[in-house]
Image (cartoon, rainbow, N blue to C red):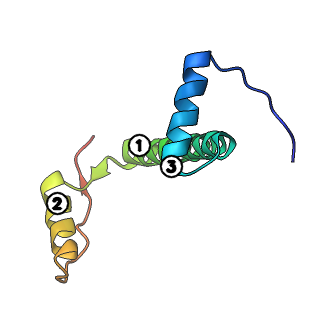
Amino acid sequence: MSTTTIRLEDDLKERVSEAAARAGKTAHAFIRDAIVESVEQAEFDAETDRICEERWTEFLKTGEAVSLDEAKAYFDAKVAGKPAALPKPRKILG
């Protein structure tokens, strides 16, 4: 494990200390948890962007998509526990 030093303005350091105390944590644990959460969010965002790019590229290649109404009906049925057939993509481009 390595050590990293960060510089915080006095008012932010005080806010971190107060927030950590409210959470029942040390300032160190509070800061570490905040960093972990931020890194995980950045990784999730990057993966979401990758998936979107992949799907957009596929859409541009095939010109096929599922309508919003069909997708919504499918998900509504699934959430309600009802059987539902996956909607079939249709050509909407080119």
Disc 3: which residue:
23
Q: Marks 3 and 1, how far apart in space?
A: 42 Å
Picture coordinates of residue 76, whole percent (x, y): 16, 68
Q: Disc 1 on helix, strand or loop?
A: helix
Residue at the spot 55% in from the left edge and 18% down from the top edge: 11
Tell me if residue 93 comes above or below residue 79 in the rendering.
above
Count neighbours of disc 3 (C-alpha within 10 A) and say few if under 14, some if 14 to 19, many if 20 or more.
few
Choose between 62 and 50: the one closer to the eye.
50
Disc 2: which residue:
72
Picture coordinates of residue 27, whole percent (x, y): 64, 39
Q: Marks 3 and 2, how far apart in space?
A: 39 Å
Choose between 57 and 33: the one closer to the eye.
33
Tell me if residue 58 comes above or below residue 19 in the rendering.
below
Disc 1: which residue:
56
What mark, if any, has residue 18 been given in the picture?
none
Which quadrant: the C terminus? top left
Tell me if residue 53 comes above or below residue 12 in the rendering.
below
Q: Disc 2 on helix, strand or loop?
A: helix
Picture coordinates of residue 17, whole percent (x, y): 58, 34
Identity of the amino acid at label 2? Lys
Residue at the spot 49% in from the left edge and 41% down from the top edge: 49
Choose between 84 and 65: the one closer to the eye.
84
Residue at the spot 57% in from the left edge and 26% down from the top edge: 14
Sequence-earlier tag: 3 or 1: 3
Q: Is residue 10 left or right of residue 65?
A: right
Q: Is residue 2 left or right of residue 54?
A: right
